[in-house]
Amino acid sequence: MRVYFFQAPPQKSRFVGVHEDILNVLDEKKLFYVTSDGKNSVDLPQEELEALNKSGGSLLDKMDALVIEGSEPDADLGYLLAYAMSMRRPTIYLYDKDVSNRGVLKYLGDRQVPSFIQVRSYSGDQVVAYVDQFLTGLVGEKAEHEPTVKFTLRITPAMERYLQWKAKQMKMTKADFLRDQIDTQVMQRDEAYKKFLKKE
Amino acid sequence: MAKQLPTITLLFAGGATLQTEGKTIVTVQSAADAQAWLEHFPELNLIAKVEPVFVLADGKDIEPEDWNSVTKIIKDRYASTDGFVILQGVDSMLYTGAFLSFALQGLGKPVVLTGSPLTPEHNQAADLQGFISHYRTLGVRANLINAVQVATKNLVEVSILFGNQLLRANRGRKSPGTSFNVFEADETDVLGRVDFGIKLKAEQQRTTDPLHVVALQDKHVAIVRLHPGFRPDELSRVVQEKPDAIILHTYMQGGVPTKLAPLLRLAEQQGTAVVVFNPYLAASVTADTATVISGMSYEALYAKVLWALSKTTNPEIARKLLLQPTRNEFGTGKETGD
């Protein structure tokens, strides 16, 4: 799972210690993370970066979740939350309880904050517990949607030619194309299966 | 006291095709639709106070007169807004962006064009469904959020935000292939990129100088594309219509076929400005019978011809305006001035 961690620039921030605590949680969870301060736990594969650049996507599209420490005002806070909302990315927005308001979130009515954005005011060590709970919940949910099941599928040469051509057209890998087709064109449209899941 | 959010004016001039979560297509056909359309984007309230203004329904049908509507709105709201975002269809965005870059003189705030990469027709095209669903976050929603964020930044020129790139509007070109980076430009004309936020290559200084707008006059600009075997009588018919200008899109490195010289002289004598669009020369020059322009995009040249003819009725001054770089339209590093 990939996490983007936004923090105020350390040279200006009063919350450097809190940022370090959050980074420690990310390290303990052994997650891939990128911080707004430019720290990467590992680098994104070059091939993936090139494909992303060509397709017109942003690096935020490649993140599964956002952790935002928003106690101090920053021009990027509103943008990041807006992007998280638009992409429906699980996000935890943290702010020190001594900060009198919820920062940029005051511009959004309570009912407009979607459920996948958690807003937490913290004091002392609470921040570690909040981030830990948030990430633990996500890891379990993510596992359900990770392509971890492997099986062999024999296809015809004609199908292979088509997949080669189509994947190139779509700037996707063949596997990504097939997974996307199964997800969006088959599973999401299968009303009988949806009813089956509800009964389960 | 907490800092207020910046105010951004959002102009609707096409390019507003939105596919909702329920797969419904929502567009803006009238002023009444604009506010309702904007309510699909509550997240914009986190970035700026966005004020919608309707210009026209379909960017494909934009006419040069509509550019006057756009520049008038920008001028009227210039003092009260921190930046402008213009939603427009991809078909005409390069023309509009180029024209605005010339028409808005003394611009001290960002003007950002963006739009939906998809039309209602795209959404019905079965063979694009996989592409659309795979990149569903990259439609007008992402473009709009990115463009509004750019409009809050320090950038004092007309730009295009599409996909993950911010380009100088009068240097952009359509990019080939299926991608949400619908436009491309030379690296020197890429003003910024979208990665974990908007990264401008260089911040520019906002100014409070007054904005001067060059209103577009009703000018007839005829376009003629030359090719081997081109018959002079084809150009003759165009010259007889006495347009204000003729743009000859040549295929020759050296200019135009010599057999056309008498017609070009006739055009000049009757007051028709003749501009040769030559993508092959390294420099723009004034020839005996025509102004030869090189190093610009075709869309930027068309917009600049309209702008120059609107700014002056003196053919000599118009010729000088065309040759003089004013908004980096020949590329960066060239001397500029109004």
Image (tube, grey):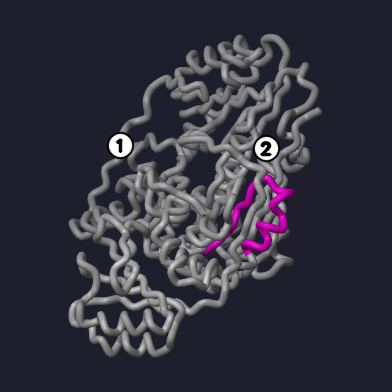
**What is the crowding at mark 1: few (fewer than 14 residues within 10 Å), some, or many (at least 20)?**
few
- Residue A120 in view of the camera: yes
Residue B62 occupies quadrant: bottom right
Residues in magenta, as a range? B70-89
| Disc 1 + disc 2, Cβ < 8 Å | no
Q: Which residue is mark 1?
A: A47
Q: Which residue is mark 2?
A: A115
Q: Position of residue A65 (x, y in %)?
A: 54, 31
Residue A96 vs B103, above or below: the answer is above
Q: CA distance from mark 1 to mark 2?
A: 34 Å
Q: Position of residue A70 (x, y in %)?
A: 66, 25
Q: Position of residue B311 (x, y in %)?
A: 54, 66
Q: Residue shown at 24%/69% (left/top)?
A: B255
| Residue B30 or residue B70, whichever sits in front | B70
**What is the crowding at mark 2: few (fewer than 14 residues within 10 Å), some, or many (at least 20)?**
few
Could you say whether the residue bearing mark 1 is in a helix, strand or loop?
helix
Q: Which chain is home to disc 1? A: A
Residue A175 vs A101, above or below: the answer is below
Task: From the viewer's perspective, tell me whether residue B134 is left or right of residue A46.
Answer: right
